[in-house]
Amino acid sequence: MSEKEKQQSVEFLNELFGKLSVASSEDERATAATNLASFINGPIEEHDVPIKFFADLKAAIKDKKQTLNALSAFSHIAGSKELAPSVEPELVELAGAVLEKAGDKDVTVKNAAVEAIESLTRNVTPRAIKAFLPHLTNAVANSNKWTEKATALKCVEILVETSRDQIALRMPELIPVLSEAMWDTKPEVKKAATSAITKSTDTIENKDIEKFIPDLIRCIAKPTEVPETVEKLGATTFVSEVTMATLSIMVPVLSRGLAERDTAKKRKAAVIIDNMCKLVDDPQVIAPFMGKLYPALKTNHANIADPEARDVTLRAINTLKRVGNIGDDDKIPEVSHAGDVSVNLDILKGLVQDKKLHPRFDNVIRYCAAISGDLIDERLTDDATWVESVRPFLVVALHDAEARETISNLRVKAVDNIPAPPNFDEEDDDGEDLCNCEFSLAYGAKILLNRTQLRLKRNRRYGLCGPNGAGKSTLMRAIAEGQVEGFPSQDELKTVYVEHDIDGTHADTNVIDYVRATAGETVGTREEVKSALLEFSFSEEMTEMPITSLSGGWKMKLALCTAVLRKADILLLDEPTNHLDTVNVAWLVNYLNTCGITSIIVSHDSGFLDNVCQYIIHYERFKLRKYKGNLSEFVKKVPAAKSYYELGASEASFSFPEPGFLEGVKTKQKAIVKVQNMSFQYPGTTKPQIRNINFQVSLSSRIAVIGPNGAGKSTLINVLTGELLPTTGDVYVHENCRIAYVKQHAFAHIDNHLDKTPSEYIQWRFQTGEDRETMDRANRQINEDDEKSMNKIFKIEGTPRRIQGIHARRKFKNSYEYECSFYLGENIGMKNERWTPMMSVDNAWLPRSELVETHSKMVAEVDMKEALASGQFRPLTRKEIESHCQMLGLDAELVSHSRIRGLSGGQKVKLVLAACTWQRPHVIVLDEPTNYLDRDSLGALSKALKEFEGGVVLITHSSEFTKDLTEEVWAVKDGEMTPSGHNWVSGQGSGPRLDKKEDDEEEKFDALGNKIETKKKAKKLTASELRKKKKERMKKKKELGDAYVSSDDEL
């Protein structure tokens, strides 16, 4: 373009602006502004900016006479579909002046300014909002005009729509400004701020807190709602990636939660911080918020009196120190400034310093620096993206070749400022990919993996390693069941989970039929399956044997053979050597090394992993990290991992409280529950559901109740526990015997208490000293038959009496007698028969044998109260409840601070077990425990039941669970029960004595937690000890004379 043409362009631009200046009507103004916008967004002059025009435009915006025309021009230029790169930076510089006019008293001017700034907001380059957003936040924070604030807030909403990803990164600086606006005195600003912050939270892609976002926003306007919101968040399982946007809306509420006066709320806030921040990988994500969270946690840790709450707070502090890279000096690291506009501007100025650029390009260079800063914040480091984003603006000041070179150098220098993330070795393997996916995994309320990558190659063997409880078996089951996001489906990639445990439903199936039933008919004929089994070293005879006759090792081989016949692409092996001898372990090593099938192996056998694995996949901070080499090579790189593979007891362990003392029971063989000739029939049925039942239960009983569905097992147990009353027969239960019963549908116990914490539920259930869940059992309800039998007339002191109530109990020979109050009968058998309550002085003591025939339920109530008074119940203190629940695998965090509604299924079952065993039962009855517990918990339960000092009765179909646990079997079929393996005795039986020793007596408490003091009976002195005491007493009397006073000890 010649100098003459350039000059003509400038003159024409001035002419168009002049026409706009004199426009007097709306139509004239619109026409002039449209022409001006069309011309200025075109190529006016190569490598130039119409700087004079924008200076004139700024002056016109501030000139009251020219404001409307100038705003119209701004609106049309900014709203152009092809906004020129030379124009956009200049318009953004004028955004503050336009926003000021949005607060003008003249409605026409205000509306024109609103239209102008909204046009620019919709058209501004998304990656340049670091240059534009400060104009909006400054207006919201500092303007005195409410219409200007409301306009800026509306523009924030528009930016969320046009620049969603970029706004997400600006949330830490945006949320405080919007929060402050929610407290504005003008209702219109409050409403606009609430709308803007609600819209801004659309950028938060975190499913864990999605449903709580309205509550979090309400907390900003109403801090009184913080405690309840913190409570809701406390029951949340955090598994999604935690970003700056997530933290920006959470931290205001959490910082207020940490400042609450209530220790429980401070503690809950610390728990949320701990759980959530575990999912932060990059220290720079948490860095902007450390100044609010870390000092507050430190203050709470120093001032909170509750030791347990202090421990929780310390745990949150340690998590923040780890993810935020805080050293031993407790100094919070500085937030990275790699993405700051000023930092990138300095780099860019240094690169173009030798170009001697004219000052008119300053705004363009600053705009390029803003885009560079956003690219750094987004961690976009590839050259193509930088050229695509920065070049259109930089070529305004530089030639294309120079611009590209400058952008390349800018990228390198800017990226060098990004703090380096943790470094892991890249996988050096060019084999065929079987899967390459990213996923998260949780078990119940526990985070196992967060946004981790899993990449598997064909014909590779991987050892899956991690500390106990990391979730290794859970991951393999999730893969096998298709629950891992992004993992190929079974149609694309056949994945088989191999374990030696075979379902009890196949117990009597022979080996060949089992393989065909499990692997499907596609495995071929019986002869083909048999041939494959022979290759796996099965003998001819073994192929026809039932599964139950196979040892654990052969079951593992059978499972492996079945997986191979299913043409597995990936074998998932969970502790494959557990049941194999050395010969078979060697066979398995050779097979896996030569079969050509990819395998993932979990094992504590370090030698086996050394001989098989080519890679180790290790659990590290909720990620899977891959290390090349076998276990020995891995341990060299991660020495701490050596401790994972030391053989020891299973991590999961339960224990039950020792049963209370039962008077008169001197051995474990003595029956404490006895049933003779019992039958039961539901009303309206044609025949009894169970009949001719005889059994007894003692403290040594280990009973498995087996039988087909509908045989009457649960009915039998319901009679045993008192849920049902027998139709005929005798049922004896020791007067102080306590039976813990977990129903087949375990959650039935707690369904009405989901908004209580486990601790509150146990307190509610036992607050009277009795178990409120058992008060509605049939054996405690007075029915019509009971009322008839209770009308029995007793002849006492020559007068006819009926029992009104039973009030106390005392020892009487080898049994008890009970204090009864009475009604006095008059004119018995006549029309005017009358029964009058008698005075308490007329109470009489009746022996138990007379009362149990007619008043057994009233007698049982007195027995219960006597047990309560004797201190056989536990104090309902938080510490005692937490300690008890800990025995069943529930930690204090869940017991005292999480609502039952937020617990996982397994945790709810553990709570039910804990509640049922609170009163130290003498017999534990479980109906189908395998229905509601996972394998780890079943193993822990099995061990606990073996060690339990009381009786155990189990209904289960799982022979694996009962085979090493139970000694006695009750086989129920067609309503009849056949016992086997029992050792019933008529009296005390043989075995160690259970006599209570005074020296071993435990501390006793009443139901309110008060200690019951018991005095030990003084030991009777021998004749020589009495003579010695007498001599000492006489000597003392002689010395003191009349001043001598004897004491009890001397006597």
Image (tube, grey):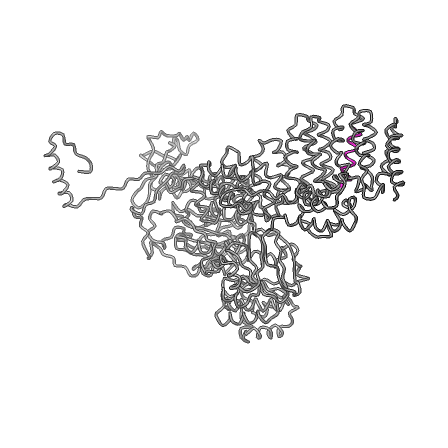
Residue at 60%, 56% in the rendered image: 478
Q: Nearer the viewer, residue 147 or 926?
A: 147
Q: Which residues are magenta?
A: 110-124
Q: Quadrant of the C terminus?
A: top left
Residue 784 visible in this rendered orientation of the protein? no
Task: Note whether 504 is above or below 878 in the view shown.
Answer: below
Judged left or right of residue 861, residue 225 is right
Task: Note whether 634 is above or below 82 in the view shown.
Answer: below
Exactly how many numbered labels are in the figure?
0
Residue at 49%, 64% in the rendered image: 605
- Residue 826, percent from left and from top: 38, 30
The stretch drawn in magenta includes residue 826 = no
Look at the magenta stretch and give its main secondary structure: helix
Quadrant of the rendered image containing residue 1034: top left
* Residue farthest left in this picture: 1038
Quadrant of the rendered image containing residue 201: top right
Judged left or right of residue 596, residue 810 is left
Residue at 62%, 75% in the rendered image: 527
Q: Nearer the viewer, residue 590 or 413?
A: 413
Q: Nearer the viewer, residue 1020 or 776?
A: 1020
Task: Note whether 108 is above or below 766 in the view shown.
Answer: above
Q: Quadrant of the N terminus?
A: top right
- Residue 634, percent from left and from top: 53, 61
- Residue 877, percent from left and from top: 43, 39
Q: Nearer the viewer, residue 72 or 896?
A: 72
The stretch drawn in magenta includes residue 118 = yes
Residue 856 visible in this rendered orientation of the protein? yes
- Residue 1022, percent from left and from top: 17, 46
